[in-house]
Image: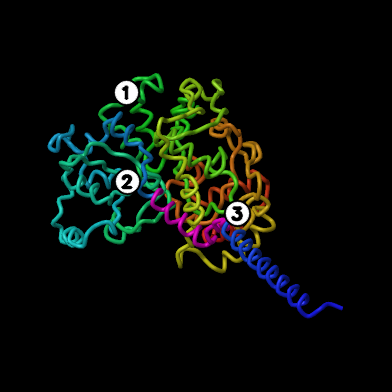
């Protein structure tokens, strides 16, 4: 049995050891906390991220020329034709009246109140190129970017996605109104605008033809058409002598749609990169070894367009936001009173059954889920445009918002002026045996989409 003195000593030693152990534990824990790695940064909330991306994409779509002013202004000198000799450029200049006549649009929301009131009162000179320069400074000309020096003189001009894929609602006056992004500008005469450029040598050098030939090709396009393949294969006309240009397509209603463009060149981000680099002539990076096929794309192969590398890339970082904004552009609804509701209900049943439309145009996207291409023979159509693409086929076109791009006709080249003609074509192609009444009802349903 331990004596009380020895027991007390042991208890004191044990207490001291406990204090030391406790202190060591605390110090260890403090050290461990101080050395623990910081928690990883949390990714942005999905909805906040998506909204920010869409907002950024809207700005890119409307206002970003990707540095293509080096081509349209620097090389072609288009800004000098806009200015006119009276403002330091060449020729008569481009007045607002002329700009509206070739299909350019004015964003009324970009105009200060005083300017809107002056326009309404007829106090703005729409025949003066100086007025056009003012509109460019206000960023009010849809799809055009004016680059001004410190003295206020126009030193270059570029184009944005909106020049072809936006229009306005004409709420203020014809050609002047609120933006309608995603809708094709079927009034825009791209060929006439490009022909105004004082220096077409970059185009003639690329195509290997003279200025007269270039202007003949551009002049054949007419309103609402553009030839994205011209700079690739040099084909300005179809074998039948008609222009090789195709209708400017909608940029709306593409969510869930696989291949973009009439002939399915690729996805939406692919086509955005293609157009920004090769058609708008922006400064970026683009890769597609299919363009090395000299037999199909002699000009693109010679210029190595499928291996485009700019010293400064002003495009690639903006493609995600641009894609997000395009996906956010829903197809516009058919205006009230633009179709017969009872006939449309009957037409929907025909669409889904006897006409077999839904076998390819499957709701809700009204295109094929997955690989949405068909051979020309499958749809009883010539292969001219299909063979100008790497795919050799035609995409199943999404059908929503058809009435919003009726101007210029239907199909890739506008060969069918009305939906009635489209239905008649497929009725004969597939031997559907639709009666005149059934065809009429089907047209009303198509109008309602």
Residue named by callout 1: 201
Residue nearer the viewer, 385 or 63:
63
Q: Secondary structure at mark 2?
A: loop
Q: Residue at x 17, y 61 (%)?
A: 114
Number of residues whose C-alpha sits closer than 10 Å to that of mark 1, classed few (under 14), some (14–19) or many (20 or more): some
Q: CA distance from mark 3 to mark 1?
A: 43 Å
Q: Does residue 57 belong to the magenta stretch?
A: yes
Q: CA distance from mark 2 to mark 1?
A: 25 Å
Q: Nearer the viewer, mark 2 or mark 1?
A: 1
Picture quadrant of residue 110: bottom left
SS state under label 1: helix
Q: Which residues are magenta?
A: 37-61
Q: Nearer the viewer, residue 276 or 97?
A: 276
Give the percent coordinates (x, y) of residue 21: 68, 66
Q: Earlier in the sequence, mark 2 or mark 1?
A: 2
Q: Is residue 60 magenta?
A: yes
């Amino acid at each position: 049995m331990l004596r009380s003195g020895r027991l007390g000593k042991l208890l004191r030693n044990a207490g001291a050891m406990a204090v030391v152990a406790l202190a060591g534990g605390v110090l260890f824990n403090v050290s461990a906390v101080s050395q623990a790695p910081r928690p990883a940064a949390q990714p942005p909330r999905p909805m906040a991220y998506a909204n920010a991306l869409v907002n950024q994409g809207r700005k890119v779509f409307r206002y970003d020329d990707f540095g293509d002013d080096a081509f349209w202004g620097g090389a072609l000198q288009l800004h000098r034709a806009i200015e006119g000799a009276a403002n330091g450029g060449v020729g008569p200049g481009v007045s607002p009246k002329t700009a509206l006549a070739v299909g350019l649009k004015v964003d009324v929301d970009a105009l200060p109140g005083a300017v809107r009131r002056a326009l309404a009162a007829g106090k703005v000179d729409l025949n003066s190129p100086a007025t056009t320069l003012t509109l460019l400074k206000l960023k009010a000309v849809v799809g055009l970017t004016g680059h001004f020096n410190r003295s206020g003189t126009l030193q270059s001009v570029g184009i944005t996605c909106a020049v072809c894929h936006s229009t306005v609602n004409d709420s203020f006056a014809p050609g002047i109104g609120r933006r309608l992004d995603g809708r094709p500008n079927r009034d825009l005469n791209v060929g006439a605008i490009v022909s105004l450029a004082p220096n077409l040598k970059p185009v003639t050098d690329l195509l290997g033809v003279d200025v007269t030939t270039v202007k003949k090709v551009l002049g054949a396009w007419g309103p609402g058409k553009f030839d994205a393949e011209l700079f690739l294969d040099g084909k300005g006309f179809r074998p039948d002598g008609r222009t090789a240009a195709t209708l400017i397509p909608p940029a709306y209603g593409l969510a869930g749609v696989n291949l973009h463009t009439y002939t399915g060149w690729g996805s939406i981000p692919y086509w955005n990169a293609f157009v920004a680099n090769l058609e708008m002539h922006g400064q970026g990076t683009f890769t597609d070894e299919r363009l090395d096929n000299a037999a199909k794309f002699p000009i693109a192969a010679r210029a190595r367009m499928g291996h485009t590398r700019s010293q400064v890339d002003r495009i690639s970082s903006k493609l995600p936001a641009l894609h997000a904004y395009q996906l956010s552009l829903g197809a516009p609804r058919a205006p009230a009173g633009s179709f017969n509701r009872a006939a449309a209900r009957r037409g929907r049943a025909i669409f889904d059954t006897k006409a077999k439309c839904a076998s390819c145009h499957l709701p809700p996207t009204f295109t094929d889920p997955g690989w949405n291409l068909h051979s020309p023979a499958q749809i009883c159509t010539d292969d001219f445009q299909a063979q100008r693409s790497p795919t050799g086929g035609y995409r199943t076109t999404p059908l929503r918002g058809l009435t919003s791009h009726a101007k210029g006709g239907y199909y890739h080249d506008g060969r069918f002026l009305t939906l009635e003609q489209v239905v008649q074509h497929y009725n004969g192609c597939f031997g559907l045996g639709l009666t005149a009444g059934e065809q009429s009802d089907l047209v009303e349903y198509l109008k309602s989409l």
